[in-house]
Image (cartoon, coloured by chain):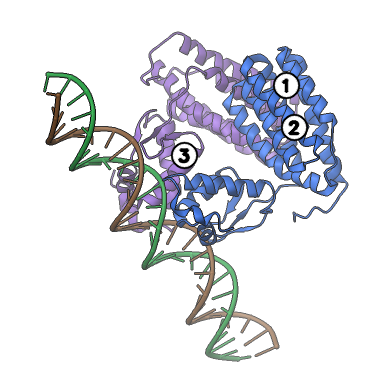
Chain colours: A blue, B purple, C brown, D green
DNA sequence: TGCATATTTCTTGTCGACAAAATAAATACA
DNA sequence: TGTATTTATTTTGTCGACAAGAAATATGCA
């Protein structure tokens, strides 16, 4: 805990905000800070060994991405996951899967595919090792890399936001299923990457849609089953 | 100019950031602050009669939406419009037009249509009055209202961002065309609204796509024509 | 005891001041 | 005169302190 405050004097000017932002963001997305957790500015300033000003700036950015909610003059806390309107999330996620993969097939350059294939290898390794957290993050990184090969920042930024939200939801998923491993995803990824590499736009779009819809169906099956997840609605 | 500083003492706690944010945002989107304009914190703090802290928070939020660019430890300025990769913008815009209108036809409630129809009246009035700025803002408000009837915050937030960016581009459009008025847009809007009201999902989607593609085509025609807009690339 | 009001405490919002980068200006040197 | 180095200026990043709201606690009164 104190290795964060120990950085107090060796910190470059302007880097503090990014450190706080990155750490808090990861803690929120990994459910280390579950939805509803109170965010206290002075507590954070003590923890990170810096004044409230840079903490505040990091919080403003997190609020901008909807990861925390701020009640004026009152408390601020980690935002809730909206399980009731989850279909909105799924609609957006599936569409972005389709669009970004399609654009990747259209606009990717050779060097993009190297990065994508490397991340796919990471994902396969995570599945083999049954490392849930690694599976989640490498999966997100892989699809984001595909999206970036499509070169449309408007889509990639929304997709990135959705994948992050997904980290919170998938974390719950793996949490309640004790790291069961969908090895099939590895094969599906390979098919998608091949379609993109072959510039088969229609096929890439179809595979991406099927891939996305399958994931959504699995999560929905879990949610409908009514398991009480350890996060209050 | 000084009516802003005169609010110094009558301001409610916490409202300052929003005021600064809203005003700067409008000034940027209306090209009152053209791309590349330097943003000076002390200057703004003098102008608005408040300390740099709330100014800074407003700037962080504007940066989060990509409306200003901040170089660490150096200057911060209004972000450029990326004319070279404009097709990315158009792709995203057309898709969001389609998706949000489609969802509106699916999920809208009666009270949504009242708001939409009211805004459509505003737009028609702006066209009649040949008020370019009003046309731009009412058009954006109208389509955003339709999007909100679709009730998917992920799409509406991206769409809102795109429509805002569009305000900057359309401002250039009208600027160089001396407020020529596309009266046809009013009729197209009416058709779209009717399709939404009739819950004809396919028709709504098709009309929205045609509407969007037509606007895009007009703007592209302008851009290809190579008119030197009074904003540097 | 139950409820309304006053007081305290706690957290956030704002301020003015100082320190660190970076840029611009000025000086020294060839 | 031109270039390199040093100094000054400007602008941002950070800090500690204070004040305002809201919540929690305590007090007064029936």
Compared to residue B162, the image places residue A46 above or below, namely: below
- Residue drawn at the location 58% of the way across and 42% of the way down: A65
Q: Is mark 2 on a helix, strand or loop?
A: helix
Disc 2 vs disc 1: Cβ atoms closer than 8 Å?
no
| Front residue of this view, candidates C2 and B159 | B159
Residue hosting label 1 = B203
**Residue B168 on image: x %, y %:** 45, 27
- Alpha-carbon span between mark 3 and mark 2: 35 Å
For marks 1 and 3 on the same chain, the one whose residue lies earlier in the sequence: 3
Classify 10 Å Cα crowding around label 2: few (below 14), some (14-19), many (20 and above): many
What label does residue B62 carry, if any?
3
- Residue drawn at the location 70% of the way across and 34% of the way down: A138
Residue hosting label 2 = A123
- Residue drawn at the location 75% of the way across and 22% of the way down: B202
* Horizontal side, residue D24 vs residue A135: left or right: left
**Residue A78 on image: x %, y %:** 63, 53
Q: In which quarter of the image is the C terminus of chain B?
A: top left
Res B128 seen here? no
Residue depth check, mark 3 versus mark 2: number of the one nearer the observer: 2
Q: Quadrant of the N terminus of chain B?
A: top left
**Residue B186 on image: x %, y %:** 56, 23
Q: What element carries label 3?
A: helix
Q: Do marks 2 and 1 share a chain?
A: no
Classify 10 Å Cα crowding around label 1: few (below 14), some (14-19), many (20 and above): some
Residue depth check, mark 2 versus mark 1: number of the one nearer the observer: 2
- Residue drawn at the location 51% of the way across and 48% of the way down: A58
């Amino acid at each position: 805990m104190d290795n964060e405050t120990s950085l107090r004097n060796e910190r470059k000017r302007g880097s503090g905000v990014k450190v706080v932002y990155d750490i808090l963001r990861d803690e929120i997305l990994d459910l280390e800070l579950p939805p509803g957790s109170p965010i206290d500015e002075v507590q954070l300033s003590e923890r990170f060994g810096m004044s409230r000003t840079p903490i505040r700036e990091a919080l403003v950015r997190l609020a901008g991405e909807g990861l925390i909610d701020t009640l004026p003059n009152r408390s601020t806390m980690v935002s809730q996951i909206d399980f009731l309107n989850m279909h909105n999330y799924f609609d957006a996620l599936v569409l972005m899967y389709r669009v970004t993969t399609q654009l990747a097939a259209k606009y990717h350059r050779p060097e993009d595919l190297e990065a994508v294939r490397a991340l796919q290898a990471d994902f396969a390794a995570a599945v083999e090792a049954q490392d849930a957290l690694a599976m989640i993050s490498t999966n997100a990184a892989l699809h984001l890399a595909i999206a970036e090969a499509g070169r449309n920042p408007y889509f990639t930024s929304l997709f990135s936001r959705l994948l992050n939200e997904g980290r919170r939801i998938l974390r719950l998923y793996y949490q309640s299923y004790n790291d069961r491993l969908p090895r099939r995803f590895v094969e599906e990824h390979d098919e998608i990457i091949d379609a993109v590499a072959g510039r088969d736009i229609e096929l890439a779009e179809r595979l991406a849609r099927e891939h996305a819809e399958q994931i959504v169906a699995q999560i929905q099956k879990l949610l409908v089953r009514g398991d009480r997840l350890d996060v209050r609605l």
